[in-house]
Image (spheres, rainbow, N blue to C red):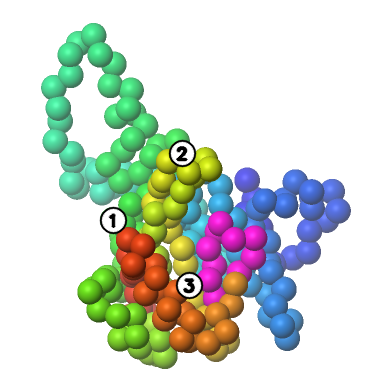
Amino acid sequence: MERGNRESLSSSAAASASSQAQPQPQPQGLFLYHERQRLQLCLLHALNNLFQDKDAFTRADLDTIARQLQLHHPPQQKDHKWWILPLPSLVFKPHHNALTGNYDVNVLIAALEGSTHQKKVVWHDRRTPAASIDLAACHLMGIMLNTSVPRLRGFWTSRHWTALRNIRGVWYNLDSDLPAPQPFRHETHLVSFLDNTVAQGGEIFLIFNQD
C-alpha cells in the first residue's frame, strides 16, 4: 500500500487513499507528512512521521530488525506436547507480531540507533516532571510516546507509538490515529500533554541527533 507523498493525489486515487498518509496543509503553506494507522504498524507510521519521510522506514526494515534481535537474544524454548501445534509462536514473535506488526521498544531503539540514522534514544524517567525536558535543545529531534489505547470499542487495549516533533518552531502531535497533525499552541500545552501521558501509564522517549 502506498503510504502517500507530497504530491497532490489524482481524482481516481483520492477515494482509495482517504485512510492513507497524505501531506497535511498548514498555515503559511507548510506541508506535514502524516501516515495514518493501519493494522498494528504504529511504530512504522510514527517513525516515518518523525522523519517526515515516507521512505525513512518500511515494514520490511522493521521486520528484519525484529528478526535480528530475536537471533541475538533468542527466547527460552518451552517444551510442547507433540499433539499441540504451537501456532501462536508462528505469529507472536518476541519483538513483533508477524501478521500485524506491533513492534516493541527494542525495535524502536535498534531502528533509530542503527548505522543508517545514528540517533540517540533516551528514556525519560517517569518520576521526573516533563517540565525538566529541554524542548529547545538543539540536538532534540523529536519525542516518541508509547501509550496504552483502547481498541474495538474498549474490548481490549494495545500499546501505541506516537511521534511528536518541532517543525519550524511549532510542536506537532503526529499520532497516526489522528485525522491530521495537531499543533500545540504553546510549549506549556505540550508539557501538560506529556505529564498526562505518563500519568496514564505512558512512556516518553527523547530522540536526539548525534551530530
Q: Which residue is mark 2?
A: 155
Q: Position of residue 159 (x, y in %)?
A: 39, 51
- In this rendering, the answer to whether 63 lies above or below 195 is above
* Circle nearer the viewer, 3 or 1: 3
Q: Position of residue 188 (x, y in %)?
A: 46, 86
Magenta residue span: 172-181
Q: Residue at x 34, y 85 (%)?
A: 131
Residue 180 image-quadrant placement: bottom right
* Circle nearer the viewer, 3 or 2: 2
First in sequence, mark 1 or 2: give its number. 1
First in sequence, mark 3 or 1: give its number. 1
Q: Which residue is mark 3?
A: 164
- In the displayed structure image, the side of residue 141 where residue 69 appears, left or right: left
Q: Are marks 3 and 2 in contact (CB under 8 Å)?
A: no
Q: Which residue is mark 1?
A: 106
Q: Position of residue 118 (x, y in %)?
A: 34, 71
Residue 172 image-quadrant placement: bottom right
- In the displayed structure image, the side of residue 207 where residue 81 appears, left or right: left
